[in-house]
Amino acid sequence: MYLIPSPQKLTYTPNEFTLKYDTQIILNSRLGFMEYNYARILKDNIKKHVCFGLNITKADDQRDNGIYLNLSPSLKEQEYTLSVQETKITLTGGSSTGLLYAVQTLSQMISQCLAVIPCLEISDYPELINRGYYYDVTRGRIPTLETLKALADKLSYYKLNQLQLYVEHSFLFKDFSEVWRDDTPLTAEEILEIDRYCNNLNIELVPSIASFGHLHKVLCTKTYEELCELNGSNSDSFSYMGRMEHHTVDITNDKSFLMIENMLTEFIPLFSSKHFNICADETFDLGKGKSKELAAKIGTEQMYVDFVAKICEVVKHHGKRPMFWGDIIVANPSAIQQLPQDIICLNWDYCTKPSEANIKKLKDAGAVQYLCPGVHGWRRLVNHLRNAYDNISEMSKYAHSYNVLGLLNTDWGDYGHINQPEFSIPGMIYGAAFSWNSDIPGYDEINRQISMVEYLDRSGNLVSIFDRMGSQDYYLWSHTVQFKELTKRDAPLEEITKLLQEVNPKTLPHSNQLIIKSTKELYQSLPQLDSQNRAVVKAYLIAAKGMELFNSIGLVIAKQFLKLPDTESDSPKDLAVALEYWFKDYKELWRSSSKEGELYRLQEVILWYADYLREIV
């Protein structure tokens, strides 16, 4: 039996407790609605795995054949104890939060042991108080409300206590119909509902909205294009590359701040969170266009800090503690002293060997930090789990050693968010496990644990199959997009050649053989999986077919431009047909968890490739 996160102290004792059909879940009589909600979670998990519908009641005495839920002032807020004895199970939390974590631990035990549970004693608490997950819901994929609730359930199961949803334009702002008219935005009621749902799981839903850079759709409208730092934003055709690199507001125009203030004032009241993430990252164009004159006078660093400080005033006026991304301030850490004293710097680094120097620089400057690794699913069909593990484990070690305020594990949607949400679950679990307990398991070991706890895979091998598959997409989705956009704008041949050399086309046939092998292993894994977890295999099979197709397409294109030897490759016309059939399946998969969002933009890329392939002689 495995438990994730690993408890701080676990001791097995002789014998076992048998969960009977007439076992009761018993709340201490002093417990209230929130604790009853957690008893319901336990009941639902028992019904899911054991098919027993246990009764919930209240009592102060502890009789045999009961699961007892209680609180103790002697425990810290997020601390809990769990005692499994031969005649009863006792769960005690330092608060309702701690009790929920005890319930989730017992739920994991029951999912693996079913009705016969080993006797043991657990004493457990998190080493980092704030443990969050950051999900991009704006640059392609907008989840349905049901998907967001399922995500919250998953975060709670692994004892995460914060969720942030990244928004640039994907909210139905009342004055922004130009921005969301071609989209399926989140509504105020949906935000209120997911906020309520998260609260019931002791998860803080932290609002997060672009307020400085990364405002592509807003600044490309006729109404707001004048507020863009660079001229001509409305006249440009859409580009994934352009969206990533540009669209910073012109801070010298008073209307810019008024627009941001209006957005924040409408958005903030929807959240019960005490925090607000203003983002303010990657302001690449600052000082390069309309604000060039001001930049010459005071410098872009001071311009940046001054505007961030103004945004923070709005956030603090509404009683929220500001957060912001630290990629700009890290170049001049002392500037943190010009921002509100309680501001939280979200220090991100997605390298497999992240920079300790930047963490130390910000700490020495007096910054309050969260460290922010990532699940490494962006720009590709399947997450690269090895990179995710290396990045998250290293950032988690720094988080513990520097005693930072929290860890926020990120899941970005660069280039249209083509990867399915469920592919990020192993990376999400890495962050949950490593932020709770600083004793970090090795890569193969944690993957085995996740296979057995999350997917109830009796073989313990499922995540290792995901791992092998996810490292074989050499013609990445980002390459796919970049080649199209370079070709469409008649980029110099040198640029296209350089891109294709990155792909290393000689590896593509061998990679496809490994993808096919992984596909076979996925089919073979089905008998080892709990029936409720088999659906994820289909999603990976569809993604694997896409990886194989894009690798084959990359090889055909590389042969065109790099003068490779005339080795055997698929017919371009056959690839076009296969791509169209694949995308039919992919769209069905997308719609199973997401609104339409920017699926149409992905379709534009796919159809362009199908036409391009048919033109190859």
Image (cartoon, grey):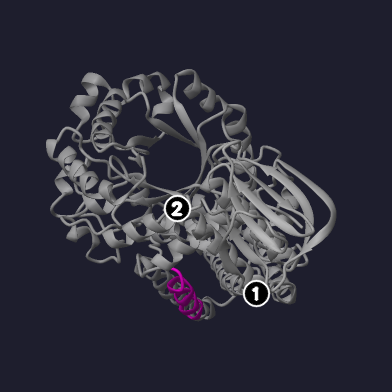
The disc label shown at residue 135, or none: 2
Most frequent secondary structure within the magenta stretch: helix
**Residue type at numbered disc 1:** Phe
Q: Closest to the observer: 496 or 219?
A: 219
Q: Could you tell me if the residues under marks 2 and 1 are in contact, i.e. CB atoms within 8 Å?
A: no
Q: Which residue is drawn at 24% across and 20% down?
A: 298
Q: Is residue 567 visible?
A: yes
Q: Mark 1 points at which residue?
A: 52
The disc label shown at residue 565, or none: none
Q: Which residue is drawn at 53% across and 47% down?
A: 97
Left/right placement of residue 364 relative to residue 144 reads right
Compute the Cα span from label 2 to label 1.
Answer: 35 Å
Residue range of the region highlighted in magenta in the rendering: 581-593
Q: Is residue 365 above or below residue 207?
A: above
In the picture, which quadrant includes the N terminus? Answer: bottom right
Query: For the residue carrying disc 2, how many other residues have a C-alpha within 10 Å: few (<14), some (14-19), or many (20+)?
Result: many
Element carrying mark 2: strand
**Residue type at numbered disc 2:** Tyr
Q: Is residue 147 above or below residue 351?
A: below
Q: Is residue 467 visible?
A: no
